[in-house]
Image: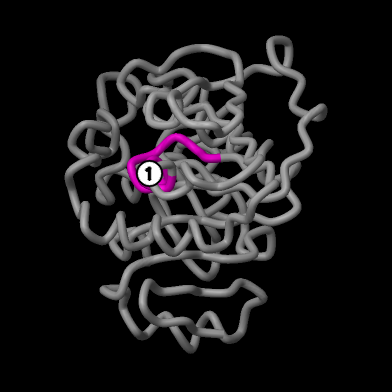
Amino acid sequence: MLPLERQKKILDLLAVKKVLKMNELTDELDISVDTLRRDIQLLSSQGKIEKIYGGIKLVDRFGESSMDERMVNHLEEKEQIARKCSEFIQDGDCIYIDSGSTTYQIAKYIKQKKKLTVITNSIPVINELMNCEVELIMIGGKIRQDEQSVVAFDYIFNFHELNVRKAFICCSGITIERGISDYNLEEAVTRKKMIELSKEVFVAADSTKFGKDVTISIAPLDRIHTIVTDGNVDRSFLPKFKKTDTSLVIAGYEFE
């Protein structure tokens, strides 16, 4: 197993258990204590984990801000992204809108669409669309109060009965090499399932997400059809996207 793969595995394990002892990790990864210490030192220096007596734990939320904070941060950019995303939504579509402060904004711009079905795990999206003619389907599962979302489980919700034309997904990190990633394992699992089911996958992400590879991998770029972002994106990413099959769409400017 390569070092990056081991380190990702450590973070995946911590996302589930929160705290792990050294002997648990060496057994799980089948590596020496010295190798584990090198991985832990690197992850600690990156601010992703914290060393405690006899083991390690996650740094609280990895600096992920709360939903309330994200609802107002970069609001103008997120509204621009949402307006652009709404242009891809047609009358009669069945779409998925992910939980997240950027995808939430999309709900504001689709209320006049005809015969539109919206599947979502976002309580704010449901509240936004409650009093219009959009048909709403809420996926079932556990409520994440801090994220105001539902994280679904197979035994509660049969994903494969959905016929999703387009999925609009959020993320916390985007890189060319690793694709899209997020901080929370349960959110990532739900997003992975919706990406698998959807005919077209759109990622709605403001420019601050680019160049970041955070805790949990969601999908490589070859699973993403289009990324919609704002005009503040670092222009060095433009030629890099030319080498991928993923379209990068910037509010006010389109790059093929």
The boundaries of the magenta stretch are 97-106
Quadrant of residue 131 within the rendered picture: top left
Residue 123: x and y in percent read 42, 23
Residue type (three-letter) at the residue carrying disc 1: Lys
Residue found 45% across the figure and 24% down from its top = 130
Q: Is residue 81 above or below residue 59?
A: below
How far across and how far down the image is residue 39, in percent?
42, 46
Q: Quadrant of the C terminus?
A: bottom right
User: Taking 249 as reference, is 182 above or below it?
Assistant: above
State the image coordinates of residue 167 (x, y, percent, origin top left).
61, 47
- Residue 7 visible in the picture: no
Q: Identify the residue at image location x=48%, y=89%.
A: 239
Seen as rendered, the residue at the extreme right is: 161
Q: Secondary structure at mark 1?
A: helix
**Number of marks present in the image shown:** 1
Image x and y of residue 66, in percent = 24, 32
Magenta part mainly helix, strand or loop? helix
Tell me if 157 is positioned left or right of 182 in this view: right
Q: Is residue 62 above or below residue 161?
A: below
From the viewer's perspective, tell me whether residue 103 is left or right of residue 226: left
Residue at point 25%, 23% (across, down): 52
Residue 238 in magenta stretch: no
Q: Residue at x 42, y 45 (%)?
A: 103
Callout 1 crowding tier (Cα within 10 Å): few <14, some 14–19, many ≥20? some
237 relative position to 221: left or right: left
**Closer to us: 142 or 83:** 83
Residue 12 can be seen in this image:
yes
Q: How is the image coloured?
A: one colour
State the residue position of label 1: 108
In the depicted structure, whether residue 177 falls above or below residue 148:
below
